Image (tube, helix red, strand yellow):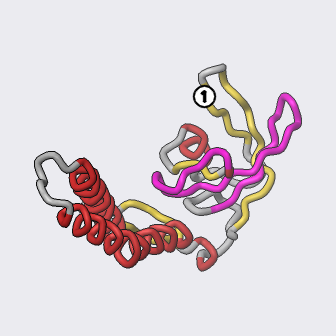
Amino acid sequence: MNKFPMTVSGEAALREELDRLKRVERPKVTQAIAEARAHGDLKENAEYHAAREQQSFMEGRIMEIEGKLGNAQVIDVTAITKTGKVIFGTTIDLVNVDTGDTVTYRIVGEDEADVKKNLISVGSPIARALIGKEEGDIVVVRAPGGDIEYEIDQVQHI
């Protein structure tokens, strides 16, 4: 089975969500189903059907998280020797060659990506262009609005 890269913080977030679903949400839904059952006829009981649907979604999410954690290859970038090379988990400061604007990205797993927090997926066009490059290299990123040239200013293992 294929392993998927994940950062330490990404694994911790998934484990926290899994724990919350199992310890808090599951008992709530079970209680809601029990209460709805007590109201009588289940065929026309909207509360019962809503609680069962909620239970179904929650159990599906639990299975999904367990599957992701089972196939995760957790990479602790802080334990890897710093070489100035862009690898999974590193935080990269980029300078737009045309405008001089600086942007910082961290390369993370697919499930951890959040562009608003500058967390980019390892499979994104920017990350694919950066992986394997070193500080000082010029990288061309193919974007829908045209090619953008960035210079890799700094690679951090944080």
Identify the residue at image location x=35%, y=70%: 28
Identify the residue at image location x=62%, y=52%: 119
Foreground residue, 84 or 155?
A: 155
Image position, residue 120 (x, y; %): 59, 48
Where's the C terminus, which quadrant? Answer: bottom right
Foreground residue, 7 or 125?
A: 7
Foreground residue, 143 or 36?
A: 36
Q: Which residue is mark 1?
A: 142
Image position, residue 1 (x, y; %): 23, 62
Q: Is residue 57 left or right of residue 112?
A: left
Identify the residue at image location x=56%, y=70%: 9
Residue 21 shown in magenta? no
Q: Is residue 151 left or right of residue 86?
A: right
Image position, residue 141 (x, y; %): 64, 33
Image position, residue 36 (x, y; %): 24, 61
User: Is residue 32 in view?
Assistant: yes
Q: Magenta segment range? A: 90-116
* Amino acid bearing label 1: Arg
Residue 100 shown in magenta? yes
Rendered image quadrant of residue 70: bottom left
Identify the residue at image location x=60%, y=22%: 144
